[in-house]
Image: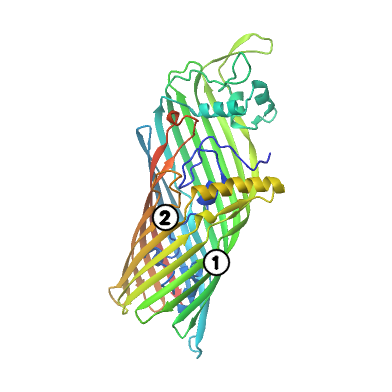
Amino acid sequence: MKKYFLTIAVGLCLPSFVFGQIYSYSNLAKYFSSTYSSGTARMQALGGNYSVLGADVTSIASNPAGLGFYNRSEVHLSMAQQNSSTSSNYLGSNAKQTDALFHLPTLGLVLAGDPNIRSKWHGAFGISFVRHVVFTQPVYVSGVNNRSSLLDSFIEKANDKKATGASLDEEYSPASNYADSPEAAAYQAYLIDPNPSTGGVPFTRYESNLPTSQVGEVVNSGAMSSWNFGYGASYLDKLYIGAGLQFSKISSSTTSNWTEEYIGGKYVAGMNYRETLVTNGSGISLSLGMIYKWNSNLRVALNFQSPTYFDQMNERYDARISPNVNGIPSFDSNGTPIIITRVRPVYVTPNEFTYQMTSPMTLSGGLAYFFGKRAFLSMDVAYINYPGMRVSSAELSSSANRQFQDKHNGQIKRDFDSALNVKIGTEVRVTTNWSVRAGVAQFGGGYSTTYDSMDRNSLQLSGGIGYRSSSFYLDLTVVQRSAKDGYTPYSLKNAADYSSAMLTKNNLQLMLGAGILF
């Protein structure tokens, strides 16, 4: 079954949005467009200052003008161990979840022109692979809810569409054990019931006054990466210009498990609702940049990163509800009263859908001051146009696609604001071969003040050391990033009846980079 709009009952934990509302493509566009510092270990130690410095493999994917600084060829590899943790407070209860992943952030090759050729111009070509974001942020929340259950959100959906027991039966296929909606699945699992007098609204659930022990766990995996091709040229070692092409890939999987226990329940002991959203897509973008040596000490830079156009964002959503019953009174086919003590899980019909997405445009500027060959101080400021994100679907009819765009692109304009990423870094050469580095960066959350009052800006601190000889180099870097976020497992019409978890997200990454010059 294909739909362009999916209703997800439990919030799939996508970084930097309030979860658990109706799942929308505006939220997914933001999720797949948010990036932090990436690149080589050296550049990450400097806070991600890669628009103005040059002569680094990171230039291929960021400011290709930096390739103009190369007068020797280079091959580079970076390795990283990333540890992610999320602390939560839900209904007064604290919890923490951790995850760890080893990955390769950067792989690159730069082929420089012959520096012995006498010319006003010289340049270099580069190709690199970069993982911009690794989706590893886990979430775990738990608490006792005295006001509501996830089942109440299913009840509201059934009531809103004026469902009846018969209409929900029509949404269910006994042969496949698939229901077309979460509320139909909950009904088939004996977790919600229609009014016995009308056979329809209002729907209810067993013993709704009981306290509910709730546990939510979200696991994310995948990455956003790109293959990058760039060329940078230098004119009289004064003006540097470059252009690059990026082929991006998104591979994301998010699984949410929501478990409830109805404390003291006579009929229903509890239930589990599991959801999975898998998304894969590929896109293309263009980068243009320039760096100018104002004098021997001062450099300035400008860099334009076009929106990435993802032509095929293929997603699959599925869900399953598993009841745990003590004994539910019912009737058999002959009308004889029986007690049901076991109910099998019921599945929501999988949904596959393809849409197009455009990420925001980024405009960056950089400034670096060099204290001879002993040290430098650099700063980057990047403007990200999050309201410029767009989604559409060629899979839909013309009129349906217009409705799709009006709905979700309108939501993008309302929910998101442009953001600034500010990065400051310094490097000091302590000996002929050894250098120490430090950096600080703030990444703007990109949310409108009308969305909610939470400050989602991310703060990043980094530092590292590097060894460089005439033929190779080694860099060791530590990066720590933290941010606040929110997790609303489900929402109800009365805001007093449901709760949100406050999240503190932390990421610690240890990187080792190595390169050979030839």
Rendered image quadrant of residue 197? top right
What residue sits 62% from the left and 33% below the top? 348
Question: Is residue 159 something that shows in the picture?
Answer: yes
What residue sits 42% from the left and 33% below the top? 499
First in residue order: circle 2 vs circle 1: 1
For label 1, the crowd category at 10 Å Cα-Cα, with few meaning under 14, some 14 to 19 and many 20 or more, is many
Cα–Cα gap, marks 2 and 1 = 25 Å
**Residue 210 at what x, y percent from top left?**
44, 20
**Residue 134 at what x, y percent from top left?**
48, 53
**Residue 445 at what x, y percent from top left?**
43, 52
Q: Does residue 192 sit above or below 61 in this rendering?
A: above
**Numbered marks: total:** 2
Rendered image quadrant of residue 424? bottom left
Q: Seen from this angle, which residue lies furthest left?
A: 430
Q: Is residue 119 left or right of residue 472?
A: right
Q: Does residue 97 sit above or below 124 in this rendering?
A: above
**Residue 50 at what x, y percent from top left?**
43, 68
Q: Amino acid at mark 1?
A: Asn
* For the residues bearing labels 2 and 1, Cβ distance under 8 angstroms: no
User: Secondary structure under badge 2?
Assistant: loop
* Colour scheme employed for the rendering of this structure: rainbow
370 and 506: which one is in front?
370
Q: Seen from this angle, which residue lies furthest top?
A: 336
403 and 64: which one is in front?
403
Rendered image quadrant of residue 38? bottom left
Which residue lies under the disc numbered 2? 444
Which residue lies under the disc numbered 1? 228
Q: Amino acid at mark 2?
A: Gly
